Image: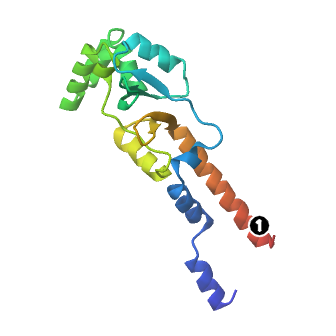
């Protein structure tokens, strides 16, 4: 390899770096791919049995979208919070042993009093079809959510994106870049 060619190769990003950049900028709509997961949508007045039944009917969905009477997103219920409420009376010692911070005590109080989706829900967290995969990851990570509702311009839930779909997107982009790099090396 000549000095100039080596320099060009060093300046060009690796296939992995290119795949990461493409993944970061890919829209939520593209990340959904051909197979989307049906969102779990519950009303804010639904009791926790209704919320539990709705979540159980959508095993791939880890976050319920709570909507108002106009079907606009008003909150989210992560599976971990619903499960904590359901098992509060089954294993209360686990909750008491795990409380170390004021935040834990507040969550315990909220869980122990909740009877409806509105009482259990957290503030809404969402993405739109035009948001990037990076935006979705950041929101999931910051809010400790396994998935997010996707909303339209009127805040109506139109889909669901989860961490597994982000993993699939990352894998797809990296496979494509490896294949392209292999083709280029082979002179195809």
Q: Which residue is farthest bottom? A: 3
User: 105 or 22: which is nearer to us?
Assistant: 22
User: 100 or 30: which is nearer to us?
Assistant: 30
Name the image quarter holding residue 44: top left
Task: Mark 1: give few (<14), some (14-19) or many (20+) Cα within 10 Å.
Answer: few
Who's the residue at 68% across and 57% down the image?
176
Q: Is residue 143 above or below residue 14?
A: above
Give the x, y percent position of residue 52: 44, 15
Q: In this view, does 130 lie above or below 165?
A: below
How many numbered marks does the figure carry? 1
| Residue beneath disc 1 | 183
Give the x, y percent position of residue 75: 34, 30
Name the image quarter holding residue 48: top left
Q: Is residue 5 above or below residue 15?
A: below
Who's the residue at 38% across and 27% down the image?
70
Who's the residue at 22% across and 31% down the image?
103
Q: Can residue 101 be seen in this view?
A: no
User: 97 or 118: which is nearer to us?
Assistant: 118
Give the x, y percent position of residue 86: 38, 13
Q: How is the image coloured?
A: rainbow
Who's the residue at 72% across and 60% down the image?
179
Give the x, y percent position of residue 31: 57, 47
Q: Is mark 1 on a helix, strand or loop?
A: helix
Quarter of the figure with the N terminus: bottom right
Quarter of the figure with the C terminus: bottom right
User: 133 or 178: which is nearer to us?
Assistant: 133
Q: In this view, does 20 lie to the left or right of 71?
A: right
């Amino acid at each position: 390899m000549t000095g100039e060619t080596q320099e060009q190769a060093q300046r060009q990003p690796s296939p992995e770096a290119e795949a990461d950049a493409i993944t970061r900028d890919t829209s939520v709509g593209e990340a959904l791919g051909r197979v989307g997961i049906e969102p779990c949508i519950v009303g804010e007045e639904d009791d926790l049995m209704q919320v539990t039944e709705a979540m159980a009917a959508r095993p791939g969905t880890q976050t319920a979208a709570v909507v108002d009477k106009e079907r606009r997103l008003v909150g989210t219920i992560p599976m971990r919070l619903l499960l904590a409420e359901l098992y509060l009376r089954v294993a209360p010692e686990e909750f008491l042993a795990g409380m170390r911070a004021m935040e834990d005590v507040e969550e315990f109080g909220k869980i122990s009093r909740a009877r409806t989706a509105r009482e259990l829900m957290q503030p809404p967290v969402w993405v739109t079809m035009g948001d990037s995969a990076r935006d979705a990851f950041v929101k999931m990570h910051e809010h400790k959510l396994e998935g997010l509702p996707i909303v339209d311009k009127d805040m109506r839930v139109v889909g669901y994106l989860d961490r597994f779909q982000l993993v699939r997107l990352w894998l797809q982009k990296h496979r494509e870049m490896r294949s392209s790099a292999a083709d280029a090396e082979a002179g195809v």
